[in-house]
Amino acid sequence: MNGTPKYAKVALKISKTDSSAFGVVNAARKALQKAGAPPAEIETYMKEALSGDYNHVLNTTASWVGFKH
């Protein structure tokens, strides 16, 4: 993924969450909700993220939110 995430002010720290695909998506969902993202946008993110393998989850999530180190 190149570029700025759609919700650049939202950032996840994967080491602080369950790093399974569902854990990453759930953490991103909660962060997007907290940031005020519309429910339809969150649903779009979740469907897109869960439509592939683990790398797809990470790449899709990175296109929506940032990752903290």
Image (cartoon, rainbow, N blue to C red):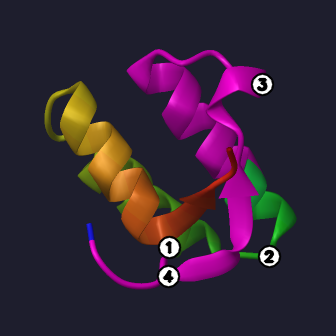
Q: CA distance from mark 3 to mark 2?
A: 21 Å
Classify 10 Å Cα crowding around label 2: few (below 14), some (14-19), many (20 and above). few
Is residue 17 a member of the stretch shown in magenta?
A: yes
Magenta stretch, residue numbers: 2-30
Apparent side of residue 60 relative to residue 25 in the rendered image (left or right): left
Furthest toward the right, the residue is 34
Q: Quadrant of residue 7?
A: bottom right
Residue at image position (71%, 39%) is 13
| Residue type at the position of mark 2 | Gly
Inter-mark Cα distance, 1 to 3: 24 Å
Q: Answer with mark 3 or mark 2, whichever residue precedes in sequence.
A: 3
Work out how far the residue at label 1 is from the one at label 2, CA to CA, in angstroms: 10 Å
> Percent from the top left, x then y, of residue 29?
63, 49
Residue identified by numbered label 3: 16
As drawn, 33 above or below 68: below
Give the alpha-carbon distance from disc 4 to disc 1, as whole Å. 11 Å
Q: Secondary structure at mark 3?
A: helix
Residues 14 and 24: in front is 14
Residue kind at label 4, given as amino acid type:
Lys
The answer to which of marks 1 and 2 sits earlier in the sequence is: 2
User: Residue under circle 2?
Assistant: 36
N-terminal label among 4 and 1 = 4
Q: Is residue 10 above or below residue 31?
A: below
Sequence-earlier tag: 1 or 3: 3
Q: Residues within 10 Å of mark 3 (few under 14, many from 20)?
A: few
The residue to which callout 1 is attached is 41
Dots 4, 1 in contact, CB < 8 A: no
Sequence-first tag of 3 and 4: 4
Give the SS element for disc 2.
loop
